[in-house]
Image (tube, coloured by chain):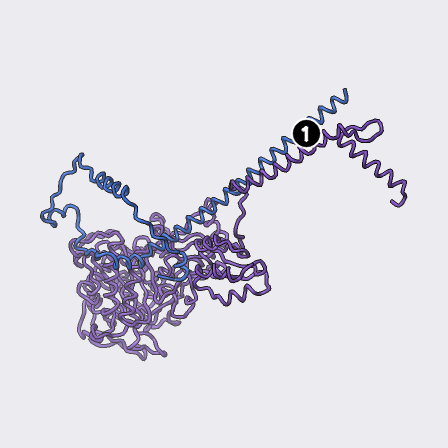
Amino acid sequence: MTDPAQKVTFFMVVRWLFAKALGSTDATGLPNFKQGRTRGRLVLAVFVLCFATISGRILQLALFDDGFNRIHTSSTANMRIPRPDIVDRNGFVLATDLRTGSMFANPRKVNDIDEAIELLSPHLPDLDVNKLRKKLQSDKGFVWVEREVTPRLQETLHDLGIAGFGFRNETRRIYPMSRLAAHVLGFVDVDSVGLAGIEKYLDDRGRLFAASLADPHKAAAAPVELSLDVRVQHGLTEELKRAVKKYKAKGALGIIMDATTGEVVAASSLPDFNPNDPKDALKKDRINRFSGGVFEMGSVFKAVTFAMAFEQRTITLQSRFDVRAPLRAGGSKIDDFHPQRRILTVPEVFTYSSNIGTAKMALGVGLAAHQAFLQKFGFFDRLRTEIPEAAAPLRPRKWRTVSTMTASFGHGISVQPLQLVSAAAALVNGGRLITPTFLKRDRELVTSHSRQVISAETSKKMRYLFRLNVEKGSGRKAETEGFSVGGKTGTAEKVVGGRYSKKHRFNSFLGAFPMNAPRYVLVVSIDEPQPLPETHGFATSGWNAVPTAGKVIARIAPLLGLRPESQPVAAESILNAAVGG
Amino acid sequence: MIRILNAALVVAALVAASIVYSLERESRLAEGRLAEINRAIAEEREQIRRLRAEWSYLNTPARLEKLAVKHLQHVPSPISQVIKLNEVAAKVPGLKLEEETGGDDAIGTMLDGNVAAVEGEVPPQPTQPDLIGNILKGME
């Protein structure tokens, strides 16, 4: 616009437009000023109205919080795929996702470092003040102040209102009962991926499946219900802990299973770990002993041999076995721990726990039938439950005569303790082998998870032998007031440096209660218990595993809702009862 | 004529525009409120989860056992004390079992007693410890 004439025209047009906007023009095309004043007031009024509206709204926002325009105080970072709650059979939460906030700071926005630290430090006792000061003095735009703050503390810290500080939310897996049932629950890593136990089982079924259980909007939303009962679990763990301490043992395990449904109501393995802080969980001695390890269970395994011989009709309760001389097989000698050196009846072979007698019994059945029977009970296969820690059994590569002889009393074959418990359930419940489960199981579905492995008649004889052994045999110390217990003891020598050691034992009690109609089976094993003065220098099962099992039963039987018996069940009465389920 | 029609159309367009605007604004407000309510629900769920975790922690058998030993004189009841109802008269001499009468409302009395207690002075509630913090620190 260099041409002056053009400039003049432009200003004329602008002026005209103004005049047009403010009021009508007169004939000269210039604004009518008298009329314009009125219009000016009108414009003023409009502006005043506009500003009044805006200020009014600002006032409204400041004074009345309608909850609509709330600014949220923390951002959500790192949203992990949610995991469902895990609860026990009575609904107590054993694992849940909780939101925790992590506090961060933007050092560039912190005005007064000293004041901030002074305000924060009373609420964060673990805070390293000097480190934080250094962090806040740095030139960075983001530093962590405190990771994983609980919701309550987060609220407190937020209310301090220090500029430059904020929170990021994260979900974290929490196990409110900490160590209780840690081996069943397992644990998760920092990204909430299940690494062991039921937690891993959930992931193995598909992460999206697990997430759908946790999403409250989905129809499938439900907590994972375990078969465990936290009270029973605690009772069992507590008694095992005492036993480990008392007998200076390396570890212990215990399983209590419903003999009629296969539900594991308690399973404990010591030493354990805290799933909230699972750094110990991968240590070698923290393995899950009830299913993640296999053991030569020793004499408790004899029960299986007896059931086999009854089932094959090679013996009756009246049969006799000559145990005067040790057996020789290959290069080894088989002898009894408490040699009787006479002819024993079948119940005596059981109660004196004669290796010679049991080996002869197995030989009487034959190698092929023995293997077939063990196979039928699942002792040659890896038992799979929900828990991914499932060890495969160990057995002789080539089954010889000596294999049958040693396997008859629980040596040379290693199985999961859980496997043995499910076998014991079949021995006493009328002959049904039920796959154990760690999840709540519908009673109606039991048939589809079980199969008949021995006759009801054989099962009755086994109940008799179990009861007799607690009445008169090696299991006497498991007798519990009000509840008739039956069971078999076992003292297995562990292999140390390639040979069986007399000093390293693995002691067990395999039992059932109440014996008139067994509802629960249990195994209690103590790994390397030491002899004590009060056990008269003995360290066999009858001195440690058996009394421990007795204490466990006395403690948990009332919790399980069993009604105490007025009279102990006599072994003979079991035999005389009609064969039922 | 055309002028009037045009004016009417302009007015109609303005009216329509303002209706559309107000509807849209309403729906946007409703959406916002919905989001807010959903957020509040999620927040409540989180609270419930937290409370359930705290409840579970408070119910940890090991903790209850410790507290019971510390504060109660009770011992586990021996099995011999668990008796059947029809044995009560025989096992507890001197105990008189009275027929339940309509007038004697035992539960009602108990409730009344409790009401009296509730109406009395409410003891000051101790400030709750941060339980989730305890779990995280592995306190047992």
Measured as percent of width and height from the top left, residue A517 is found at 23, 53
User: At label 1, which amino acid type do we have?
Assistant: Leu
Q: Colour of chain A?
A: purple
- Give the image quarter of residue A351: bottom left
Residue at 32% x, 77% y is A500
Q: Quadrant of the N terminus of chain A?
A: top right
Q: Is residue A364 visible?
A: no
Residue A531, by quadrant, is bottom left
Estimate how packed mark 1 is, as few (under 14), some (14 to 19) or many (20 or more) residues with alpha carbons within 10 Å: few
Judged left or right of residue A492, residue B34 is: right
Number of marks drawn: 1
The answer, for residue A250, to whether it is visible in the render is yes
Image spot of residue A325 (x, y percent) = 22, 77
Q: Nearer the viewer, residue A141 or A526?
A: A141
Which residue appears farthest toward the top when viewing the image? B1
Q: In the image as oriented, which residue stretches furthest toward the front?
A: A34
- Local secondary structure at mark 1: helix
Q: Nearer the viewer, residue B103 or A225?
A: B103
Closer to the camera, A457 or A230? A230
The chain under label 1 reads B
Q: Which residue was labeled with disc 1?
A: B14
Residue B86 drawn at (x, y percent):
15, 45
Horizontal and vertical percent position of residue B76: 22, 57
Q: Which residue appears at 40% of the width and 62% of the height? A: B137
Q: Is residue A113 left or right of residue A577?
A: right
Whether residue B17 is situated above or below residue A214 in the rendered picture: above
On the rendered structure, is B91 left or right of A94? left
Q: Which chain does blue denote in the image?
A: B
Furthest residue toward left: B94
Q: Is residue B140 left or right of residue A105?
A: left
